[in-house]
Amino acid sequence: MNGETETETDLTFSWDGLALAGTLHLPDAKGPHPAVLMMQGSGVADRDSGGYFVPIRETILGMGIATFSFDKPGCGASTGDWRHYALEGRAAQAMTAVEFLRSQPSVDEMRVGIWGQSQGGWLAQMLASRLPDLAFAIANSGPSIDIAAQNLYGCSHTLRAQGFDDDDIEQALVFMSDLHTAAFNAMSYEEVETTLLVEARKQPWYGYVTIKDAEDWAEGCVFATDAYQPREAMARIECPFLAIYGGRDVLVPAWQGVEESGIALDKAPTTDATVVVFPNGDHRIRDGSTGNFVDGYLDLLGDWMAKRAFIENS
């Protein structure tokens, strides 16, 4: 607890037999407070997303808005295994977390919003399309393309940035496509190991996608059958929505995302939609040369969020 700026309270909520543990951070002001649920990207992630959330959270708290984030299943103090859940599972967890956050006495239930990074950006799109009474939703590097397309884009552009040539990249993309087909068809780990992984592990590009065991493969199979379509979801959004992209992102086609998000949001019921690209920002909207957030990013987050939390929904 930091008595000068905020109060921290560890909280646990239940979802589908799991105990999901997180922390509610309150600003140093009289409540009840507007609040935001912060959602991590892919992979192993605790409630601080390995420290990535900390400066973002400090900015949000500085605007008088509370934050809540929780450890993914099997991470930190949460039970379960994050690898068992694709986007629909994560969205269900997040929707339960929103209701849990609204139930806290220190939170104004009418002024709860969401913010998500990367895969969490997909979740922000999903929840915003399903919860019209959100105070706001922010998708940070949330792809406008589906899971399979994002996997191929990320593979191609990451390998190119690492100096691999066209032949290596083409081999890796064929491997990725074969993996997706195998996962969609629920091929067993043993069969995938024999037909695809043994040879792929000999290739210099294999480090981009590593499948260590049957649990890793099971996660891939869950995601392969997830039919989420981002543009369809964004076209249904009713709440205030902000999409942010980094122009130097190698995992998400940022400029394509700007165009496609804009078109989808123009069709949506919401009358408050903003799409922003920071040309020098990477996947986490940071400057690759310094590791710091690009100029203006944190200011945009705080100002945009506070306007919706305190003015338009007051």
Image: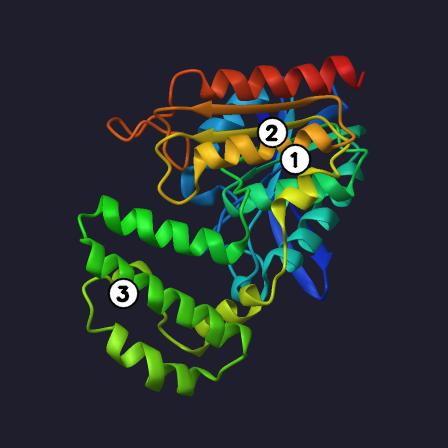
The residue singled out by tag 2 in the image is 262
The residue singled out by tag 3 in the image is 171
Instruction: Name the image quarter holding residue 176.
Output: bottom left
Tag 3, which secondary structure? helix
- The reply, left or right, for residue 123 in relation to residue 101 is left
The residue singled out by tag 1 in the image is 264
Q: Position of residue 190 (x, y in %)?
A: 41, 87
Q: What residue is rendered at 35% in x and 84% in y? A: 195
- Amino acid at pointer 1: Ala
Report if the CB atoms under discs 2 and 3 are less than 8 Å apart: no
Report if the CB atoms under discs 2 and 1 are less than 8 Å apart: yes
Give the CA distance from mark 2 to mark 1. Answer: 5 Å
Q: Quadrant of the N terminus?
A: top right
Tag 2, which secondary structure? helix
Q: Position of residue 288 (x, y in %)?
A: 28, 31
- Amino acid at pointer 3: Gln
Give the CA distance from mark 2 to mark 3. Answer: 34 Å
Q: Earlier in the sequence, mark 1 or mark 3?
A: 3
